Amino acid sequence: VLEFAIVLPILLLVALSIIDFGRYFYVRVSLASASMEVANAVSRGLILDTDSTDIKQVKILAVVNDVSPGLARFAQLDSAAQVNLSPLPQPCPNTSNQTVASISTSFNSISPLDSFFTSASSQVTLRCLR
């Protein structure tokens, strides 16, 4: 019983750290996929110059939630969590003939250790297709 009491906290710490590591890389891969889809959609004309900032955010968040539903909630362990879209991509066509999609979210650890991963982000640049 004494040995189990000594080993159990260490095993739990290792198990929770492994789960956190897996969660973090799942979030990173999901963000990369979502930012690629956002850049692709924007390069094909998803957002227009005439759209307001709110409309642009709604359209882009719809793409993110379509690709990775509940990603921010999974990363932050909070039901009200959101991903950050900063800065908003420029509509195509534009002067640089490219669009940049940047998506990030904070990451909350379940491990009692101080987390090495506090946020995850992805940025994709694509050439405008229209």
Image (spheres, rainbow, N blue to C red):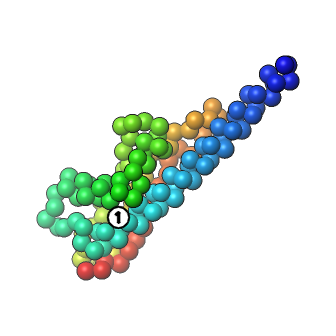
Instruction: Report which quarter residue 98 is drawn in.
Output: bottom left
* Residue 114 visible in the shown view: no
Residue 12 screen position, x and y as percent: 70, 32
Horizontal placement of 101 versus 110: left or right? left
Residue 123 screen position, x and y as percent: 43, 63
Q: Is residue 81 above or below residue 91?
A: above
**The N terminus sits in image quarter:** top right
Residue 76 screen position, x and y as percent: 46, 40
Instruction: Report which quarter residue 37 is drawn in.
Output: bottom left
Horizontal placement of 31 versus 49: left or right? right
Query: For the image shown, how many numbered marks are present on the structure?
Result: 1
How many other residues sit within 10 Å of disc 1, few (<14), some (14-19) or many (≥20)?
A: many
What residue do we see at 30% from left, 80% from top?
A: 129
* Residue 90 visible in the shown view: yes
**The C terminus sits in image quarter:** bottom left
Residue 44 screen position, x and y as percent: 28, 74
Judging depth in this view, the residue of 30 and 124 nearest the camera is 30
Q: Is residue 110 above or below residue 121?
A: above
What residue do we see at 35% from left, 71% from top?
A: 40
> Which amino acid does the dot numbered 1 rest on?
Val
In the rendered image, which residue does mark 1 sit on? Answer: 38
Instruction: Report which quarter residue 99 is drawn in.
Output: bottom left
SS class, disc 1: helix
What residue do we see at 66% from left, 44% from top?
A: 18
Judging depth in this view, the residue of 76 and 121 nearest the camera is 76
Horizontal placement of 17 versus 99: left or right? right
Q: Residue furthest left?
A: 50
